[in-house]
Image: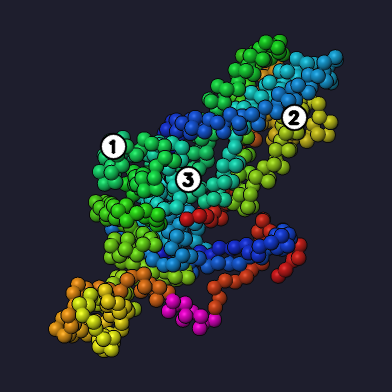
């Protein structure tokens, strides 16, 4: 019932979200620049692997890896933690709470509607680079490519709701942005954002294997560059969807408790 | 119908004095106080009533409105709006209320108001023809004209408020919570918004609960006024009756055409002003007739006027009297409390 109503309102929300993204295009481009870390790492690692492959990663592997990372990160990252944090602290969440739609739906609409513009700006560049310099390492089977598509959606949902959860903590702590910085540090290492997980020390690989972070980035990346395929890839995607479901439920539960503490500051 | 029964809303507030030392100290030991923003408020409002909510800053007006619109959860007591518990924020509840806050906006800053209208239409599921009709009505009442297509940030305060009202009323709610809807607006705009609210109330038989710093707003609009101070109700009913109870005197003013002796005036009433240009006296209502006829027969005067004392003065006196009475009683306005379960606390002293 509620879900159907939300679905009916979605097209309008997405359209308006897109209009807002366009209105904020300058900030948007600057913010995009902050997601270019993979390009820095790309430069670094290709020079390391210039003469000989580094633990199984040649130059082309690094190019493919970091460009795939750039693509996935572009689609899945968002500033929703900052947004929720500010709205709770300054009392602007009130307006959202007065509307008969779950705030998660309106946040999701805002951030989903930014994806097309991001794709427009960043992805073509990455695609061109991938195809010209690393074509032979990309996944080619239709099944793997389909799995990549699903895993990209799964990564978006998982990342978004983990970020929503961190933002929701602002109901308890004055600024959840501090927690976000800690999270980003852990994420950068355990998701494969900084370094391919295969290059981490053994014990860290174990940790990464059992943590949710790899499903936000590394899994779709590995599928796209053909390091994960077939049944293995399918199993990883199933695990990812389980994590994503847990994130949605966890965020909802936390929100339900937290919103009772909302103090609607200002005015 | 709105039912508020023994509503209490207490906030825990972190206190610390200014300065670096205090800042460092507050890292380890946080001191909290409980502020009783609303402390045992009860009232009932029938469908279609227009009720004014008066009180000084921090009296608990806005907090009560936020509880009624479901933003805040009561610390204790019962609140019901048309059979709904606001805090549950059921869709059916949110569709029939609106909250307009003069100092908070729902319009999207960088987009024209029309986009906010479109979004609200989708979220509140207002059918297209009804939307067009309501928009036309609102346009006629508020004179929106071309405002809706300019980016919100380029609108003046008054223009923005009009658009805020339109956005808040698009789904034709039957209960209106208005928190300072005319703040910062010029007199003409205040008047316009006031008339609009009355018109909306009559057209939709909507319940209106309004707070305003402008007493004129409240008096002109609301037959019933609830006065709240320090989180409790100190008056509920007709405002004129309240004024009469506090200040039974009328203000008689005139322009003297010849010099009048102060002693002569003092025999008639309390002299508030005694200038060559204007004389003002406070006169008990039952003496009014005698005083006026005496003035007209025995003195040469012009521009005689009789009015109630200014409302602001009356309210100030009311709050002052109440505070004085409270000061005599043992004060417990704020309880200092150390907290046990706060995530934000980082206490290593284990104080009780």
Above-or-below relation of B251 to A265: below
Give the residue drawn at x 63%, y 49%.
A175
Above-or-below relation of A42 to A136: below
* Mark 3 on the same chain as mark 1: no
Is residue B260 toward the left or the right of residue B351 in the image?
left
- The span picked out in magenta is B320-330
Report the front residue among A2 and B344.
B344
Q: What's the image's color scheme?
A: rainbow
Report the front residue among B227 and A261.
B227
Secondary structure at numbered mark 3: helix
Above-or-below relation of B13 to B323: above
Instruction: Estimate the spatial distance between the alpha carbons at disc 3 and disc 1, rounded to whole Å.
Output: 24 Å
Instruction: Estimate the spatial distance between the alpha carbons at disc 2 and disc 3, rounded to whole Å.
Output: 36 Å
Is residue A176 toward the left or the right of residue B148 in the image?
right
x then y, percent, for residue B260:
24, 83
- Residue projecting furthest to the left: B297
Give the residue drawn at x 57%, y 50%.
A89
x then y, percent, for residue B27:
72, 58
The residue beneath circle 3 is A96
* Label whose residue precedes the other's in the sequence (2 or 3): 3
The chain letter under disc 1 is B
Say which mark, if any, is on residue A194.
Answer: 2
x then y, percent, for residue B267:
26, 89
* Mark 2 on the same chain as mark 3: yes
Report the front residue among B33 and A191.
B33
Asked whether B323 falls inside the magenta stretch, the response is yes
């Amino acid at each position: 019932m509620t879900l159907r109503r939300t679905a009916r309102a979605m097209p309008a929300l997405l359209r308006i979200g897109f209009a807002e993204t366009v209105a904020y295009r300058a900030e948007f481009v600057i913010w995009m620049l902050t997601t270019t870390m993979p390009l820095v790492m790309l430069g670094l690692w290709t020079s390391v692997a210039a003469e000989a492959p580094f633990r199984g990663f040649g130059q082309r592997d690094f190019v493919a890896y970091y460009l795939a990372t750039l693509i996935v990160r572009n689609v899945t990252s968002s500033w929703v933690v900052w947004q929720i944090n500010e709205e709770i602290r300054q009392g602007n969440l009130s307006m959202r709470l007065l509307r008969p739609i779950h705030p998660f739906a309106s946040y999701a609409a805002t951030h989903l509607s930014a994806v097309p513009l991001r794709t427009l700006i960043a992805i073509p560049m990455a695609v061109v680079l991938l195809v010209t310099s690393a074509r032979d390492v990309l996944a080619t089977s239709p099944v793997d490519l389909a799995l990549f598509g699903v895993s990209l959606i799964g990564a978006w949902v998982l990342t978004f709701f983990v970020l929503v959860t961190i933002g929701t903590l602002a109901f308890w702590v004055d600024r959840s942005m501090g927690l976000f910085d800690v999270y980003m540090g852990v994420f950068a290492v355990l998701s494969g954002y900084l370094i391919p997980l295969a290059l981490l020390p053994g014990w860290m690989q174990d940790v990464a294997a059992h943590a949710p972070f790899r499903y936000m980035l590394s899994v779709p990346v590995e599928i796209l560059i053909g390091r994960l395929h077939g049944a293995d890839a399918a199993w990883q995607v199933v695990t990812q969807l389980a994590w994503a479901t847990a994130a949605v439920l966890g965020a909802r539960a936390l929100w339900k408790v937290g919103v009772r503490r909302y103090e609607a500051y200002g005015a | 119908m709105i039912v508020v029964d023994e509503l209490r809303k207490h906030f825990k507030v972190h206190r610390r004095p200014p300065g670096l030392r205090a800042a460092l100290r507050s890292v380890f030991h946080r001191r909290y106080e409980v502020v009783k923003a609303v402390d045992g408020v009860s009232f009932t409002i029938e469908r279609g009533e227009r009720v004014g909510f008066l009180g000084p800053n921090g009296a608990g007006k806005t907090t009560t409105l936020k509880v009624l619109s479901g933003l805040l959860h009561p610390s204790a007591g019962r609140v019901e709006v048309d059979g709904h518990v606001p805090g549950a924020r059921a869709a059916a509840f949110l569709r029939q209320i609106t909250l307009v806050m003069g100092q908070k906006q729902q319009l999207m800053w960088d987009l024209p108001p029309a986009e906010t209208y479109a979004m609200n239409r989708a979220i509140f599921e207002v059918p297209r023809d009804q939307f067009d009709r309501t928009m036309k009505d609102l346009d006629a009442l508020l004179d929106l004209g071309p405002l809706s297509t300019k980016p919100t940030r380029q609108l003046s305060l008054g223009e923005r408020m009009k658009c805020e009202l339109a956005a808040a009323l698009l789904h034709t709610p039957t209960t209106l919570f208005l928190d300072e809807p005319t703040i910062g607006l010029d007199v003409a705009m205040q008047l316009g918004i006031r008339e609009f609210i009355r018109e909306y109330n009559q057209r939709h038989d909507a319940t209106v609960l309004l707070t305003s710093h402008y007493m004129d707003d409240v008096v002109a609009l609301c037959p019933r006024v609830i006065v709240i101070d320090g989180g409790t109700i100190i008056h509920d009913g007709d405002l004129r009756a309240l004024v009469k109870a506090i200040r039974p005197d009328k203000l008689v003013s005139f322009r003297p055409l010849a010099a009048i002796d102060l002693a002569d005036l003092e025999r008639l009433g309390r002299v508030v002003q005694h200038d060559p240009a204007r004389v003002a006296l406070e006169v008990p209502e039952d003496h009014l007739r005698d005083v006026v006829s005496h003035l007209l027969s025995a003195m040469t005067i012009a521009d005689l006027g009789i009015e109630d004392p200014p409302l602001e003065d009356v309210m100030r006196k009311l709050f002052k009297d109440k505070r004085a009475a409270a000061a005599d009683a043992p004060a417990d306005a704020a309880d200092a409390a150390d907290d046990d379960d706060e995530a934000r606390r980082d206490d290593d002293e284990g104080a009780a």
